[in-house]
Amino acid sequence: MLLAHGVGGRQDLPIPFSAALTGAALALLVSFVALGALWKEPRLNAALTGARSLPGAIRTAVTAPAWRWVWRIAGLVVAAYFCIGLIFGPDRADNPTAGAFYVLFWVGLVPLSLLFGPVWRGLNPLRTLHLLACKGLGRDPELGLRPLPPGVGYWPACAGLFAFVWLELVAPERATLPVIGAWLAAYAVLMLAGAVVFGSRWFDHADAFEVYSDLVGRLAPAARRGDGAVVWRNSLDGMAGLRPAPGLTTLVVTLLGSTMYDSLSNAPVWVRFVQESSVPAPVTGTAGLVAVIALVLAAYRAATALAGRWGAAQPGTTAGEIAHSIVPIAVGYVVAHYYTLFLLEGQRTIALLSDPLDTGADWLGTAGWTIQAFGTTPAGIATLQVTVIVIGHVLGTVLAHDRALALFPRRTAVLGQIPLLVLMVVYTVVGLLLLFAA
Amino acid sequence: MTIAPARLRPLLAALPLGVALLMATSACGGSDAATPAQSAAPASTESAAPAPAESAAQAPAESAPPAAGESAAAAPADPAVKEITVTIAGRKVTPPPGRIEVTKGQTVRITVTSDTADEAHLHGYDKAASLQPGTPASIEFVADETGLFEMETHESGLQLFQLLVR
């Protein structure tokens, strides 16, 4: 991600070919080991019935209304602080808005959700504003003017996610205040209007950031179970709890495809192509983004259709049932791509946030921060990038294996998994190649 | 954990093994980066001060580039300085955008000639040069941070090249 001057000036070096090759070999090895040696009956337990409970005090704390309000208010305060720079700050590289939005918020949402679960649901200032308005009017926030149509699923969030990745990767002048401001204003209006019409449930289906945080947060080590108990869980059990819904496949594929496009668009071949064509760059960029997502989706559709046929699953079920296993792969990609950006640019943004109006103020006491490298050597970064991509692949493979056992009859279970394994190996190898070449 | 540990064991055992393998190979990849520095050192012997050139030849890759930088200050036409020349004419960049690799610590001199008034900017290092039509403008600096950095023009929004510092 390179957003004009200011955010993301430094990018990671391409990884050494040997590292890409090792990662690819590992991914292949793991896939075959998984196919041959893993369990033969579905074992993941999305209901978390056997999970170990955390102490009762924690449960009492997190179920208390005060707990929710603390985070709601925190979300409002942080959003209000962000708006100071956005609305009143000067439109210069020293304005923290672009860094705060693209790096601290969007990239930072991943580690936060990986650790603590679907955090944005608790923090979302728009949800809180809607709640407060409903309380003021004496209405039930759950109830809108009309019920949410049943087939909506993740489609609105899908559109929102695409709108965001387009803004982040393609939109002209995307680091400037008018562009960020206009995008956020449109987003806020759509979210609030939807909440008025369909009730607060709208956020679960339409808020791209809530849905993203929820997808990633399913890998968190602790969670609140259906019965209210807070439990330690296996991340794989959490991920297996993501059930098929309309739009889910497109959502996870957009997540993966947009990160691939981010790498690809940095390759000199692509840069040359865009600059030398007579078509305006945003048009080529949009076409490229859509094409990459479409290719990832086509590969996914083809592999799951074949898996369904070979595995003798109920027709039409495989694509949705396997979608959850793409999430760890996408998360691995995201961490590999944005780890150093978050670490280095995040520090710079926190320093800038201390003076959002660029008047020489130091409100947070961080204005004097100098960026620490924290041991980010080229070899260390390359190792981390390949490691997280391979870990994502391993988790995805295990999740797909377990689900395949539930989907396919025992007789055809191994055969049915082969297209899925090939798909995941392809995703992983493409990811590694992009890190190597782009 | 609801996973059968016995079944998962080979998988888990393969992981640390793989990571170790990976670290070893990427460490090898890291040492590859030393080669350009060594090739730069003999070049500097031709032009100027023998003392820095000697130390450059003996020292490992890390310390060689600063020596090359010193000799650059003494003799402006030093071949140890990485010269990058770009021309923009009718929105066409010559040579076409690609990657240019330099060694950490090496001095880089970028000369840009544009047919329109513009500003050229190197991201990350935040070096800028204002371009007047037909007049070459230069930026010279020591590449002391590793990574990939894009050189762009602000008005026309063209990418000129990507500087790869290892």
Image: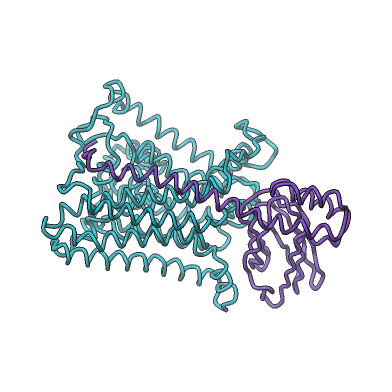
Chain colours: A cyan, B purple
What is the quadrant of residue B164 in the picture? bottom right
Q: Quadrant of the N terminus of chain B?
A: top left
Front residue of B106 and A72 = B106
Front residue of A399 and B19 = B19
Looking at the picture, how far across and down is residue B70, in whole percent? 83, 50
Viewed as shown, does residue A265 lie left or right of A60? Answer: right
The answer to whether residue A36 is seen in the rendering is yes
What is the quadrant of residue A163 in the picture? bottom left
The answer to whether residue A178 is seen in the rendering is no
Front residue of A387 and A307 = A387
Numbered marks: total = 0
Looking at the picture, how far across and down is residue A41, in whole percent? 15, 47
Looking at the picture, how far across and down is residue A356, in whole percent? 61, 41
Viewed as shown, does residue B135 lie left or right of A66? Answer: right
Instruction: Identify the residue shown where x is 62% and y is 67%.
Output: B98
Instruction: Identify the residue shown where x is 54% and y is 77%.
Output: A279
